[in-house]
Image (spheres, grey):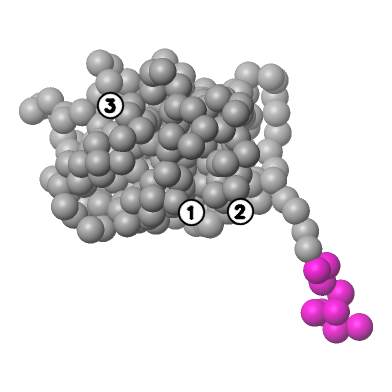
Amino acid sequence: MSKNQARKPLEIKISTVVAVAALIGDTDYDKLSSALAHLTAGTPDYFEDEFTLLDFAHVSPPPGPGQIDWVRVIALFKSHRLNPVAVRNVPANLEDEIRANGLSIDRVDASRQFELTPPPSPAASEPVSEEKPKPAPVTTAAPVTAATSESVNMMVVDTPVRGGQRIYARGCDLILTAAVNAGAEVIADGSIHVYAPLRGRALAGAAGNAQARIFSLSMEAELVSIAGVYRTFDDGWPKDLSGKAVQIRLRDERLDMAPIEVK
């Protein structure tokens, strides 16, 4: 039997996918269009075909059946290179029309979602790349890497995380004792500890935990995020922090990055 003949026609594996969450405050089409235009400042490639979750938690009163032109709203987001895939926080009587327009109903918690809002401007003393920040990149879904759970509050990974791999520590901290290579992605609902070089993407507090932190003995990350507030480093890290032991935490909705004293 050939290799192709032995292959199963379909396999289902658990994977994690990062999306942006569009927090909608008004269902008026013109207001949404104006808000997106203002957010992107007319830049056609501000977003990069991210999966998008439409969250209506801030709409008051909640929309009723027939009040939202889903075809038009979906087309509006797609025109800005955002791809709506699911809807959250809507009344049950809207679910049939939402599904009829090809969208799913999301009832899970806020894990792995990132707000469709640019992070606040950093303080003048905070080193930052001058390029505009973008939401956490969406990567092709990959099987979750096997790891050891030392307790309910910790996941430990002892092998290097290769480019293209993604690890998600659901409901706990993530501890890595080997390098996270460029193109890899590590995600945790708690904090992320990397006792080696961190060169890929690190997303802590994925379920909204603003107290989560990111630690690395050699910080060279492509992107870091805590509770949805993110920073990218397309031009590399500042010289005073690059390759050094660094901790990152959230202060006043801003990522605070500081060296760790290693003696």
Picture residue at 61% right of the left edge, 53% below the top? 142
Picture residue at 25% right of the left edge, 41% below the top? 30
Q: Which residues are magenta?
A: 1-9
Q: Residue 135 location, x and y as percent? A: 34, 43
From mark 1 to mark 2, how far is it between C-alphas?
8 Å
Residue 27 visible in the shown view: yes
Q: Do the residues bearing badges 2 and 3 touch, measured as CB atoms within 8 Å?
A: no
* Marker disc for residue 255: 3
Relative to residue 235, is residue 243 drawn left or right? right
Q: Nearer the viewer, residue 229 or 20?
A: 20
Q: Type of residue at label 1?
A: Thr
Q: Residue 252 location, x and y as percent? A: 25, 16
* Marker disc for residue 139: 1
User: In the rendered view of the protein, which quadrant contains the N terminus?
Assistant: bottom right
Mark 1 residue crowding within 10 angstroms, few (<14) / some (14–19) / many (20+): some
Element at label 3: strand
Q: Type of residue at label 2?
A: Ala
From what the image shows, is residue 152 above or below residue 221? Answer: above
Picture residue at 78% right of the left edge, 63% below the top? 10
Which residue is label 2 attached to? 142
Element at label 2: loop
Q: Residue 189 location, x and y as percent? A: 53, 26
Element at label 1: loop
From mark 2 to mark 3, how far is it between C-alphas?
28 Å
- The image quarter containing residue 230 is top left
Q: Residue furthest left?
A: 124
Picture residue at 45% right of the left edge, 27% below the top? 63
* Marker disc for residue 194: none
Q: How many marks?
A: 3
Instruction: Tell which circle, 3 or 1, labels the residue nearer the N-terminal end.
Output: 1
Q: Do the residues bearing badges 1 and 2 touch, measured as CB atoms within 8 Å?
A: yes
